[in-house]
């Protein structure tokens, strides 16, 4: 294999999964040289936006050498063999620190085994580039912590990349690998995907295995983030393998061919500007992006219609019971000394959650079930629902909220946590930029277990030239990182 030099090296940060696979197969690129190029790019991106935590890159190079040997022997594992991926610091990687963005875990021994999702990626031959930043225990809508510092948005470093997978979103935007592993408990994949101009999918609950119990499992899922829908689909296929220890695994298999269809003919598409939860006004440019997405789908043969989404109860109070009580439960299991080293904002969330009674929690559970039933009824008449990911684009890091909003208050983030409550798949698709040059994302929501339909519709939107962010912006971002 030739090394990744000159023309090939200059394009490494742009290559998709399929392009890397073809370059490895043709001997034009080596997994080792690609890994070395992207580790350098990681350092440059880190200096620009602080998206990574320190890890030992020797494991990265060892994985790349093993992939290179398989390619030389003509025995690659599959489409992801040798493909670089980053892992969010809420997910365990064998022999790499797992801080969960928290000072309380500094000095703890590294995990001795991978999380189930990470194990599937390792089995697929992926090369792990590094771990991306997250706020303490994934508890913020932005990405900053005492242990990782503040992560910023590559499009404007005075703004947040979103959270809690903000490091993953910023890294993708700067070309640090084509894939990133994120988690989403209330929007943590979709918010940074929208604000960093990349694609993100919150899969259906149970689609990606989570073999060990996590206190936020009733909402949180692990999913792919990528610079293209196809790349995310390849990643999801690799992860969506059954695990005997996962009590919540979906019985329905993931169908890659269906996810990679290029048509929307006959699909019933609902359009909404508030998802039935109008707690914050939607900016005009975001509403325009949703309308453009609706026009794209209508023009390719989808049946697009406005939908009046109605919930049987106000979603936010019910969500807050779970959000706050689950953090209270997690912190109650910790020694007091460790607890007091956590983010004060997280401690405040947990303290509020500790005031709920068992009756409060059961009433909220009843409300969640009612919301899920209402969503199932809604999706009996449509295949997907499209609308905003967020009512605003990325706010300034100095505020961590839009004008008039307060940090950590979910009233200005009303459109993402709904689908964690119901367990349904939902994506964020880049749909242009606002007047400040900050990306806008449109959300595509599907019926339970219909991840393929969400990806299919997302792919149609992505393939429409007017819906994509212009390539020149990627060049500007490359300049921020110092080039590949």
Image (cartoon, rainbow, N blue to C red):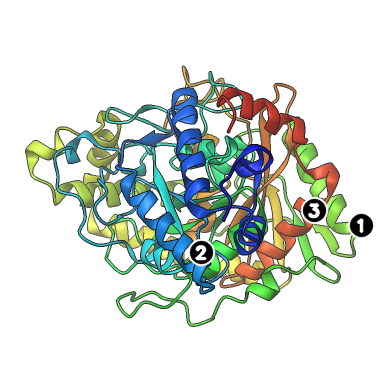
User: Counting residues from the N terminus, which is met first, the one under dot 1 or under dot 2?
Assistant: 2
Query: Could you say where residue 184 lies in the image, as x and y percent from the top left?
Result: 46, 52
**In the rendered view, would you say 305 is above or below 287?**
below
Q: Residue at x 52, y 66 (%)?
A: 71
**In the rendered view, would you say 320 is above or below 82?**
above
Regarding mark 3 in the picture, which secondary structure is present there? helix
User: Residue 433 occupies which quadrant of the picture?
Assistant: top right
Q: Is residue 417 left or right of residue 218?
A: right
Query: Could you say where residue 34 lies in the image, as x and y percent from the top left?
Result: 53, 47
Q: Quadrant of the N terminus?
A: bottom right
Residue closest to the eye, 104 or 124: 124
Q: Is residue 387 left or right of residue 401?
A: right
Q: How many marks overall?
A: 3
Q: Is residue 119 left or right of residue 14?
A: left
Indicate which label's residue lies in the foreground, 1 or 2: 2
CA neighbours of label 3 inside 10 A, class few (<14), some (14 to 19), many (20+): some
Q: Is residue 103 left or right of residue 167?
A: left
Regarding mark 1 in the picture, which secondary structure is present there? helix
Query: Could you say where residue 5 lies in the image, as x and y percent from the top left?
Result: 60, 40
**Residue on which the image places disc 1:** 299
Separation of marks 2 and 3 at Cα, in angstroms: 25 Å
**In the rendered view, would you say 165 is above or below 30?**
above
Indicate which label's residue lies in the foreground, 1 or 3: 3
Regarding mark 2 in the picture, which secondary structure is present there? loop
Task: Tell me if residue 97 can be seen.
Answer: yes
Residue closest to the eye, 474 or 188: 474
CA neighbours of label 1 inside 10 A, class few (<14), some (14 to 19), many (20+): few
Separation of marks 1 and 2 at Cα, in angstroms: 37 Å
**Residue on which the image places disc 3:** 463
**Residue on which the image places disc 2:** 81
């Amino acid at each position: 294999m030739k090394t990744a030099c000159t023309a090939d090296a200059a394009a490494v940060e742009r290559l998709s999964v399929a392009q890397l696979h073809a370059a490895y197969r043709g001997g034009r690129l080596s997994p080792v040289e690609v890994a070395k190029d992207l580790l350098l790019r990681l350092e440059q991106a880190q200096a620009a936006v602080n998206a990574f935590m320190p890890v030992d890159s020797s494991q990265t190079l060892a994985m790349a050498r093993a992939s290179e040997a398989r390619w030389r022997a003509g025995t690659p594992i599959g489409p992801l063999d040798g493909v670089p991926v980053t892992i969010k610091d809420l997910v365990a990687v064998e022999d790499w620190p797992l801080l969960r963005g928290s000072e309380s875990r500094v000095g703890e021994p590294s995990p001795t085994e991978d999380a189930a999702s990470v194990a599937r990626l390792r089995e697929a031959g992926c090369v792990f580039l590094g771990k991306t930043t997250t706020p303490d225990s994934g508890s913020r809508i932005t990405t900053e912590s005492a242990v990782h510092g503040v992560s910023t948005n590559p499009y404007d470093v005075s703004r947040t990349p979103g959270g809690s997978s903000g490091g993953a979103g910023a890294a993708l935007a700067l070309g640090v690998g084509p894939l990133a592993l994120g988690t989403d408990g209330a929007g943590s994949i979709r918010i940074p995907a929208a604000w960093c101009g990349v694609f993100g999918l919150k899969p259906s609950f149970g689609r990606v295995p989570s073999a060990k119990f996590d206190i936020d499992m009733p909402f949180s899922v692990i999913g792919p983030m990528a610079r293209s829908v196809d790349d995310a689909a390849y990643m999801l296929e690799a992860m969506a393998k059954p695990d005997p220890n996962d009590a919540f695994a979906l019985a329905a298999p993931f169908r890659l061919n269906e996810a990679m269809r290029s048509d929307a003919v006959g699909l019933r598409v609902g359009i909404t500007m508030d998802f039935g939860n109008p707690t914050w006004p939607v900016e005009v440019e975001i509403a325009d992006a949703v309308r453009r997405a609706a026009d794209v789908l209508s023009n390719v043969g989808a049946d697009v219609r406005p939908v009046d989404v109605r919930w049987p109860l106000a979603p936010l109070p019910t969500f807050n019971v779970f959000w706050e009580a689950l953090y209270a439960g997690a912190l109650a299991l910790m020694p007091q000394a460790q607890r007091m080293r956590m983010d004060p904002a997280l401690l405040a969330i947990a303290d509020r959650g500790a005031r709920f009674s068992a009756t409060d929690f059961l009433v909220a559970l009843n409300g969640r079930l009612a919301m899920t039933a209402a969503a199932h009824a809604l999706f009996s008449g449509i295949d997907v629902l499209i609308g905003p990911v967020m009512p605003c684009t990325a706010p300034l890091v100095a505020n961590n909220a839009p004008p008039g909003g307060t940090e950590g208050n979910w009233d200005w983030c009303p459109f993402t946590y709904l689908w964690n409550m119901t367990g349904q798949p939902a994506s964020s698709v880049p749909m242009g930029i606002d007047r400040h040059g900050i990306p806008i994302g449109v959300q595509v929501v599907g019926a339970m277990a219909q991840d393929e339909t969400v990806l299919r519709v997302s792919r149609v939107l992505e393939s429409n030239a007017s819906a994509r962010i212009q390539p020149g912006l990627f060049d500007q971002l490359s300049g921020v990182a110092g080039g590949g």
